[in-house]
């Protein structure tokens, strides 16, 4: 699954987010609650399913 931030950044579960120490294959529900968008800094509530 992919999740998109209001700024356009896409979190892809298959890829993860290395800059935030989120490993590839990490499901969205398993991403830490304090995760913020690496582009704009908004938190998880500003993401929606792509």
Image (spheres, helix red, strand yellow):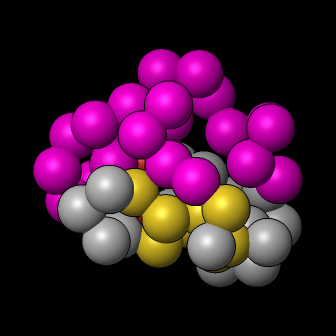
The residue drawn where x is 33% and y is 48% is: 37
- Residue 28 lies within the magenta run: yes
- Residue 40 lies within the magenta run: yes
| Range drawn in magenta | 27-48
Q: Position of residue 23 (x, y in %)?
A: 68, 59
What quarter of the picture does the N terminus occupy? bottom right
Q: Does residue 24 appear in the picture of this structure?
A: no
Classify residue 14 by image quadrant: bottom right
Magenta: main secondary structure equals loop
Q: Position of residue 5 (x, y in %)?
A: 40, 57
What quarter of the picture does the C terminus occupy? bottom right
The image shows residue 5, relative to residue 43, as above or below, that is below
Q: Does residue 37 appear in the picture of this structure?
A: yes
| Front residue of 9 and 49 | 49
Classify residue 46 by image quadrant: top left
Classify residue 29 by image quadrant: top right
Seen in the image, is 13 located left or right of residue 35?
right
């Amino acid at each position: 699954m992919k999740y998109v931030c209001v700024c356009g950044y896409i979190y892809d579960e298959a890829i993860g987010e290395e800059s935030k120490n989120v490993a590839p294959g990490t499901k969205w529900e398993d991403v830490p609650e304090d995760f913020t968008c690496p582009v704009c800094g908004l938190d998880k509530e500003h993401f929606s399913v792509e």
